[in-house]
Amino acid sequence: MDPTTASDSPVAPIFVYGTLMAAPLLAWAIKGDSSKAGDVLSQRKPGTITGFERRRVHRRDYPALIRSNDTRTVDGYVIFPTSPSEWKKLDNYEGSSYERTPVVVDMADGSKLDAYTYVWKGEAETLADEDWVCVFETERLDAWLKRFGGMVLAG
């Protein structure tokens, strides 16, 4: 899939399933300001991917996405970057522990969408056998927003 051929955006959509599901972090990552969370809501739509599972990374606040050998699903959001710069900022945010991988997303309206997601490249031994969404949003999101306050991603 060519990242520059998506029909609704100058770059391909990206399925996110972890920290970037939090609108303030997404706003910080692509707009440079977590207070612009309301501005990014129109750039995301709910979706689900099949054949993957989301796992907590030991001693980290973020998850990993790994392939599963069954029909497990992962809920998340499809992000529609408005520029190549936003796409690059998402890549920079995810870093070298993840590999951008093509996926098909089942959208909430019943349609299917070709997109990319970030699949874990790290060691399987570093993953906990649990999901982390509720813990992150209730216990760690504020700390992340404070950590990144005043920083801007290059892109």
Image (cartoon, rainbow, N blue to C red):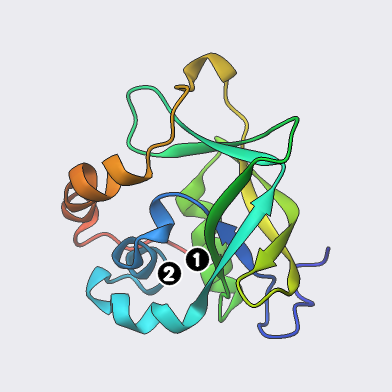
- So how many labels did they put on this image? 2
Question: Taking 63 as reference, is 38 above or below it?
Answer: below
- What mark, if any, has residue 155 been given in the picture? 1
* Residue ID at (48%, 18%): 126
- SS for dot 2: helix
Q: Is residue 129 left or right of 22 when viewed as pictured?
A: right
Q: Is residue 111 left or right of residue 55?
A: right
Q: Amino acid at mark 1?
A: Gly
Is disc 1 in contact with disc 2, using a CB cutoff of under 8 Å? yes
Residue located 26% across and 59% down the image: 151
In the picture of the structure, the residue carrying the numbered disc 2 is: 30
Q: Position of residue 18 (x, y in %)?
A: 45, 49
Q: Amino acid at mark 2?
A: Ile
CA gap between label 1 and label 2 equals: 9 Å
Closest to the observer: 142 or 108? Answer: 108
Q: Is residue 132 above or below residue 47?
A: above
- In the image, 140 versus 50, the foreground residue is 50
Q: Is residue 89 above or below residue 8?
A: above
Q: Residues within 10 Å of mark 1 (few under 14, many from 20)?
A: some
